Amino acid sequence: MSKWEENVRKVVPYTPGEQPKDQNVIKLNTNENPYPPSPFVMMKVNEMKDDILRKYPDPTADMLIESLADYYKIDKSSVFAGVGSDDVLGMIFMTFFKGELPILFPDVTYSFYPVWADLMDIKYETVPLNDKFEINIEDYIKPNGGIVIANPNAPTGILLEKDKIIKLLDNNKDSIVVIDEAYIDFSPEGSSCLDLISKYDNLIVVRTFSKSRNLAGLRLGYAMADPKIIKYLNDVKFSYNSYTLNTFTILAGTAAISDDAYFRKCNEKIIATRERFSEKIKELGFTVLPSDTNFVFASHKEKAASDIFQYLKNKGIFVRYFNLPGIDNYLRISIGLDEEMDKLLEELNTFLTQD
Ligand code: PMP
């Protein structure tokens, strides 16, 4: 090993879902939205003048921050945006977690959390889910250096009731509590914790444009919290990279927020497809966890998930398989177009009925 290598920050990186080059693949492996972005987004992008790319973007992304603040009826001092919610979450880890006590998150959750913790030398403890893959709030009522919960959780898809999050907050007034609401727009109305940010100044709600706003390729995410939290986040962001959001992203994101009818229509379609698909795979012998997201987490009673995954991949249908303890017999299947889900059901049926 060279001398300089002793000083390398060695990490085991997060593995994102595969992005196949073949455009004919039915892609149900990264929870993207199967519908295109709002036509209004494309209109705004097409109207863009080249001058916009000649200049630096607005480092405060004011137009976008203001439109998010108006949309959610909160003050702009309560909104922070970044390059996807990954960037926002990474910035949150960097800003708020550096104490002696470990931060807490579930043992089965978004697998980027431990990667950021390792990268930034943040102490952490994973808290087991119960045997129904649910989060037990009582387990988070102990001294900690912060709490991160994806709600609904991923890859399980299970939503934690709001009264339980209130209990979590009431018992953790001295810690930063991050609720990652990447999938909340696919959950029943009233499930979000956003309205609690005015009551709990230690709560951060994180959202993304990648799922319910059909813009995973844009890379845009945001956090909403008490202005003091947002100020600390901005101090770190401006100490690291002033221009996280480019002008193109700021314009397209603002346009997406203004087309609420399209947003609601797509989400309703996805929820309807999810419900229909869940029933159908249950008929094929799958156990399906209750999902309030744009994916389902399912396990077959007889066939190994890894075999189903490989069979589907050979047939040009990509789903997600995590070879991790406790979930290695499950598949995470994103909800696509109705015709894509029908094709998947057809292939599953063929696989399960062959000798
Ligand atoms: N949080 C959760 C729970 C996720 O599943 C994802 C998607 N991989 C993200 C955050 C990050 O999404 P993005 O960076 O695209 O906003």
Image (spheres, rainbow, N blue to C red):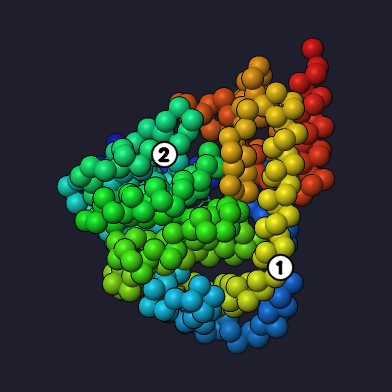
When asked about the image quadrant of residue 75, the answer is bottom left
Residue placed at 67% from the left, 64% from the top? Answer: 264
Is residue 318 left or right of 131 when viewed as pictured? right
- Residue 151: image location, x then y, percent: 47, 49
Q: Residue furthest front?
A: 163
- Residue 125: image location, x then y, percent: 29, 38
- Residue bearing mark 2: 135
- Foreground: disc 2 or disc 1: 2
> Which of the pair 245/41 is nearer the observer?
41
Q: Can residue 6 be seen in this view?
A: yes
- Residue bearing mark 1: 262
> Which of the pair 38/202 is nearer the observer?
202
> Which of the pair 334/46 is nearer the observer?
334
Looking at numbered disc 1 in the image, what kind of residue is underneath it? Answer: Tyr
Report the Cα–Cα distance between label 2 and label 1: 33 Å
Residue placed at 73% from the left, 55% from the top? Answer: 269
> How crowded is the residue under tag 1: few (<14 C-alpha within 10 Å), some, or many (20+)?
some
- Residue 57: image location, x then y, percent: 49, 80
Of the image marks 2 and 1, the number of the one nearer the N terminus: 2
